[in-house]
Amino acid sequence: MIRSMSAVRRQIKERQPLIHCITNPISIHDCANAILAVGARPIMAEHPREAAQITASAQALVVNLGNITDARIESAGISMRTAREEGIPSLLDLVGVACSDLRYTLARDLMKDAPPAILKGNITELRRMADEAGAAGIEHEKGVGIDARRQDALSDANRSAVIRCFSRLSNRTGSVILATGKQDLIVSGDRAYLASNGVEMLSGITGTGCMAGALCGAYLPGGDPLTAAVLGVSVLNLAGELAWEKAKGPGSFQAGLLDELYGLTEEVLKEKLKVTEVPVM
């Protein structure tokens, strides 16, 4: 995996692919700068009348459901369909689908029309999309805001069942499943990885979850979706570790995070990466 990740990083820096992001105003600035920091180029277009043209000119698409408007709903559908028709890889970030029926229905419609290369969310959001009520002893309930329920967190007791659930979801949709949390879980069919880098402060500032999706999208043109998903979350979490070593608080941490994303070396990636393959049983 580390070899594939390094190759993708080099390719993105050389090719500087255009990444079309339909995201939310809360994190649009952070996502654009994160994409630039790793060598790709962002375009943050959301008007329905230009969505198809912009998407067709890009090398990857990221759709984030973090802040819904009529225009974003229409543009998301247009862009996802265009990406499918043009063979452009996409990522769908399921922000809030566990607390909003509107977002849940929108996500289902988007997945039905154009399944993404990567389907990202927290465990509660992804469980709702999997429609597996009661799986692993977790009842099918709504999340609290955009956060996962505490009882849904990965543990020794539920890890195998969660992986099996997401393996079925991956096989059904054809998407790589990226479940973010204290440990990130990435599942593609019969392969699964746990990514364990990161620091608590990443959840102490706004936009880092959206940045993770944007970074995965930035790496999609460089390789397969599984590598892009593992690489995107790992690069963000490693940058978070390095930034927190120097930060005085959330303000300096936020600035430092961007610096570390930009300056992350291959040597540090190889030395500090905490990614393990886990069985799908």
Image (tube, rainbow, N blue to C red):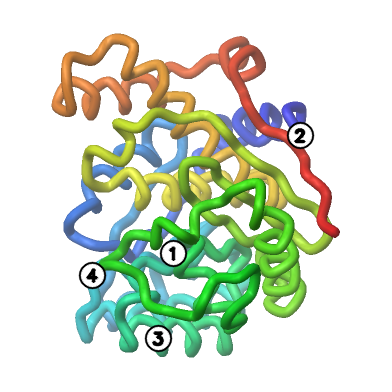
Going from the N terminus, do you reach mark 3 or mark 2 first? 2
User: Label 1: how many residues lie within 10 Å, few (<14), some (14-19) or many (20+)?
Assistant: many
Going from the N terminus, do you reach mark 4 or mark 3 first? 4
The answer to which image quadrant residue 252 occupies is top left
Q: Amino acid at mark 4?
A: Asn
Side (left or right) of 169 relative to 76: right
The image position of residue 94, as x and y in percent, is: 43, 69
Instruction: Choose between 18 and 104: the one closer to the eye.
Output: 104
Please indicate, yes or no, whether residue 114 appears anywhere in the rendered image.
no
Instruction: Choose between 26 and 206: the one closer to the eye.
Output: 206
User: Label 4: how many residues lie within 10 Å, few (<14), some (14-19) or many (20+)?
Assistant: some
Q: Label 3: which residue?
A: 106
Give the distance between the C-alpha atoms of the residues marked 4 and 2, in whole angstroms. 34 Å
Which labelled disc corresponds to residue 1? 2
Give the distance between the C-alpha atoms of the residues marked 3 and 2, in whole angstroms. 34 Å
Q: Label 4: which residue?
A: 67
Instruction: Choose between 24 and 271: the one closer to the eye.
Output: 271
Q: Amino acid at mark 3?
A: Leu
- For image coordinates 41% across by 73% down, the residue present is 53
Q: Are marks 1 and 3 in contact (CB under 8 Å)?
A: no
Q: Is residue 154 above or below residue 33?
A: below
Q: Amino acid at mark 1?
A: Asp
Going from the N terminus, do you reach mark 2 or mark 1 first? 2
Q: Is residue 104 above or below residue 148?
A: below
User: Label 2: how many residues lie within 10 Å, few (<14), some (14-19) or many (20+)?
Assistant: few
Q: Label 1: which residue?
A: 93
User: Label 3: how many residues lie within 10 Å, few (<14), some (14-19) or many (20+)?
Assistant: many
The image position of residue 276, as x and y in percent, is: 73, 34
Please indicate, yes or no, whether residue 32 appears anywhere in the rendered image.
yes
Going from the N terminus, do you reach mark 1 or mark 4 first? 4
Going from the N terminus, do you reach mark 1 or mark 3 first? 1
Give the distance between the C-alpha atoms of the residues marked 4 and 3, in whole angstroms. 12 Å
